[in-house]
Amino acid sequence: LALDTADDTPITRILKQAVDTVGKAKDQTPPKTEDERIFDEKFQKYIATLTEKGYFQGTEEGSDEYNQRLQKAKDRLIAEEEKALEARKEQAEIKKAEGNTFLRESKIQEAIS
């Protein structure tokens, strides 16, 4: 959209503001979800631990080798998080089955504890 900058009318000011707002919105990344923020925190702690243990020793931050190790670390943490999630799901299914058994036996207090 091309606007005549010499034309300073109320409608052109509104249109210019709208164009600026849309342009700024395109440049912004969407806000992170709660899960993404939690993962980012875990990842930062994980990287700090790996750094303390010398995982990045001999590499310069931003180098190809460093970035490859960083990606490998991220992939490993993602795999560990997925494994932990599956374990929690399995535990939840076990608890659900136990609760259902108690309900069938009319043991309400046991079902909710």
Image: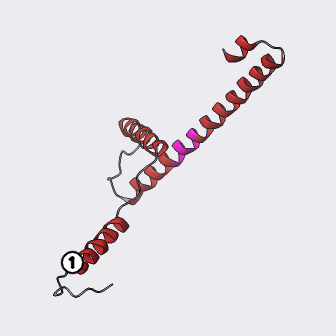
Percent from the top left, x then y, of residue 34? 46, 42
Question: Residue at horizontal 68%, vertical 27%?
Answer: 91
Direction right: furthest residue: 105
Task: Estimate how packed mark 1 is, as few (under 14), some (14 to 19) or many (20 or more) residues with alpha carbons within 10 Å.
Answer: few
Question: Residue at horizontal 19%, vertical 85%?
Answer: 5
Percent from the top left, x then y, of residue 21? 30, 68
User: Is 51 or 84 nearer to us in this picture?
Assistant: 84
- Quadrant of the rendering where the C terminus is positioned: top right
Question: Residue at horizontal 48%, vertical 46%?
Answer: 73
The answer to which quarter of the image holds residue 41 is top left
Range shown magenta: 75-81
Q: Is residue 34 left or right of residue 59?
A: right
Question: Residue at horizontal 56%, vertical 39%?
Answer: 81
- Secondary element at image label 1: helix
Q: Is residue 19 left or right of residue 106?
A: left
The answer to whether 96 is drawn above or below residue 6 in the figure is above
The answer to whether 12 is drawn above or below residue 99 in the figure is below
Percent from the top left, x then y, of residue 102? 78, 16
Give the residue type that dot 1 points to.
Pro
Residue beneath disc 1:
10
- Quadrant of the rendering where the N terminus is positioned: bottom left
Percent from the top left, x then y, of residue 100? 78, 23
Q: Is residue 100 left or right of residue 75?
A: right
Q: Is residue 46 magenta?
A: no
Visual colour scheme: secondary structure
